[in-house]
Amino acid sequence: MRHLLDTTDLTLGEIDDMIALACDIISDGKKYSHICDGKKLATLFFEPSTRTRLSFEAAMYELGGNVLGFSEGGSSSASKGESVEDTVRMVSCYADIIAMRHPLEGAPRVASFKSGVPIINAGDGGHAHPTQTLTDLLTIYREKGRFDNLTVGLCGDLKFGRTVHSLIKAMSRYENVSFVLIAPKELQVPEYIITDVLEPSGASYIQVEDMEQEMPNLDILYMTRIQRERFFSEEEYLKHKDAFILDLGKLRTAKEDLTIMHPLPRVNEISTEVDDDPRAKYFVQALNGKYIRMALIITLLKWGGAL
Ligand code: CP
């Protein structure tokens, strides 16, 4: 049995296989419509979500399976003091696979020690969001046809944005990927992303505060929202909330084949006028999330011997 707690739990070969499976699902979904008949996915969401939870649920239904779970910790016995370990121990009696989102970093890993079924980290605090990264990789693959030789700009709240941390971990494993980290100094990536991920990988990176200067160099621009819920004070959030707003004017110098991504939800960091630009791929990206989660559910259930 394997869990997915961080993107680096998967080898590059396993990621390739999962992307190939997702592409096959996209081209012939009917082939997979009964593969999970009789299986159950539990979605344990202790934090709000639209895309991740609903795309997991849609994924399981499209595979022929069923779904149970909760969308806020307050409606579970966690509100009576039950530990994550005990919750998961119980739920693994009722479901074949579990997707968990939790505000505490490391909670899905703790859960995995007591679970009898595969645990998928659907986002833990500011730490990691590996299924978003698989979604991002599928999007990059479908748009660019490769993961190497790319200049990737990441812009916004790089400190608290777990999707950014997971994507850097994933993309720094490929050849000749350059990162342009665009954020106010206070919202730059945590130090461990530099010392434990970027520097050991040999990937080139620069840290800048200006989006427009680097725009002509980018193959991918990954926008993120300022994560209000993770700031220690409202005052700090207000200081940064409008730090970057992408509009058509700022895209004037961008490459014609730039891919604009965003894990969503968006607040105001991408002006809605950009949505109709052919380079805007964030809604396609959200759809890709369902396909890659279908591929992930199949893969983890197969690895665990349940399929
Ligand atoms: N991208 C993402 O994780 O969105 P949700 O918070 O809506 O799940």
Image (cartoon, rainbow, N blue to C red):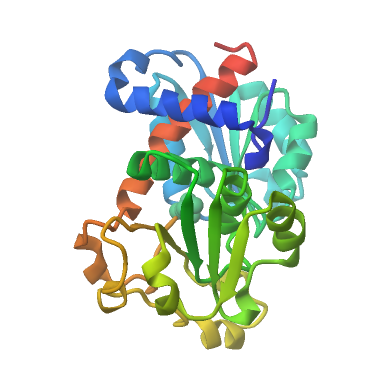
- Please name whichever residue, 140 or 94, is drawn nearer the observer in this view of the structure: 140
x and y percent of residue 72 in the render? 56, 51
Left or right placement of residue 7 versus residue 270 in this view: right
Quadrant for the C terminus, please: top right
Residue at the (63%, 81%) spot, across then down: 185
Left or right placement of residue 137 versus residue 175 in this view: left
- Please name whichever residue, 196 or 7, is drawn nearer the observer in this view of the structure: 196
x and y percent of residue 153 in the render? 48, 63
Task: List the single residue furthest toward the left.
Answer: 276
Left or right placement of residue 282 versus residue 83 in this view: left
x and y percent of residue 130 in the render? 58, 44
Residue at the (26%, 78%) spot, across then down: 249
Q: Specify the quadrant of the image occupied by residue 6.
A: top right
x and y percent of residue 287 in the render? 34, 42
- Please name whichever residue, 207 or 286, is drawn nearer the observer in this view of the structure: 207
Q: Specify the quadrant of the image occupied by residue 58.
A: top left
Residue at the (35%, 22%) spot, across then down: 24
Residue 299 visible in the current orientation: yes
Left or right placement of residue 269 versus residue 176 in this view: left
Quadrant for the N terminus, please: top right
Residue 267 visible in the current orientation: no
Above or below — where is 265 with respect to 49? below
Residue at the (46%, 26%) spot, across then down: 295
How many circles with numbers are drawn on the protein? 0
